[in-house]
Image (cartoon, grey):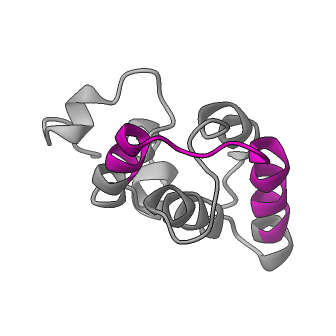
Amino acid sequence: MRLRLMPWLGLALATTIAACGNPCDDLVNRICSCNSNDTTVTACKNKVSADTTNNSPTSAQKDTCSKLLDTCTCSALACGNYAACGLANDTSGILDGSQTCH
C-alpha cells in the first residue's frame, strides 16, 4: 500500500527536523521509509529536508521525537494512526500508551 504522507510531513515535521544524528531525523527517516518505493522515499526525504532547512529542533522537540520513535511504525501509519508518529495535533494519548491501532 502506498502511503500519501508527503503533505503531512511538510506541515507536521517542518519545525522538528534539522541536523543529522538527532531523534527527529530518525523519525522522519522512519516515516518516509514507509512509502512503497525508493523514488517515493527519496522524494519524501527531499521534501522534508527542503521544508526544514535552517530549523533546529529544541531539546523538548527532540524528547518528543524520541518518544514517538517507540510508537511510530509503518503499520500504525497504514491503519491511519498518525498520532503514533506525531502527525496529528494531539499526540498526548499515544505518548502515554493509551491509544492503539486496531
Camera-side residue of 41 and 4: 41
User: In this rendering, is residue 20 above or below 13?
Assistant: below
Residue furthest toward the top?
89
Q: How many marks?
A: 0
Q: On the image, which quarter does residue 5 sit in? A: top right
Residue displayed at 13% across by 35% down: 98
Q: Which residues are magenta?
A: 42-65
Residue 34 % position (x, y): 59, 65
Q: Is residue 55 magenta-colored?
A: yes
Residue furthest toward the bottom?
38
Q: On the image, which quarter does residue 20 sit in? A: bottom right
* Left or right: residue 45 compared with residue 62: right
* Left or right: residue 95 compared with residue 10: left
Residue displayed at 62% across by 35% down: 15
Residue 35 % position (x, y): 67, 64
Camera-side residue of 24 and 32: 24
Residue 17 % position (x, y): 61, 50
Residue displayed at 59% across by 66% down: 29
* Left or right: residue 74 compared with residue 41: left
Please identify the dominant SS of the magenta region: helix
Residue displayed at 61% across by 40% down: 13
Residue 26 % position (x, y): 51, 66
Camera-side residue of 32 and 74: 32
Q: Is residue 58 magenta-colored?
A: yes
Image quadrant occupied by the N terminus: bottom right
Camera-side residue of 102 and 3: 3
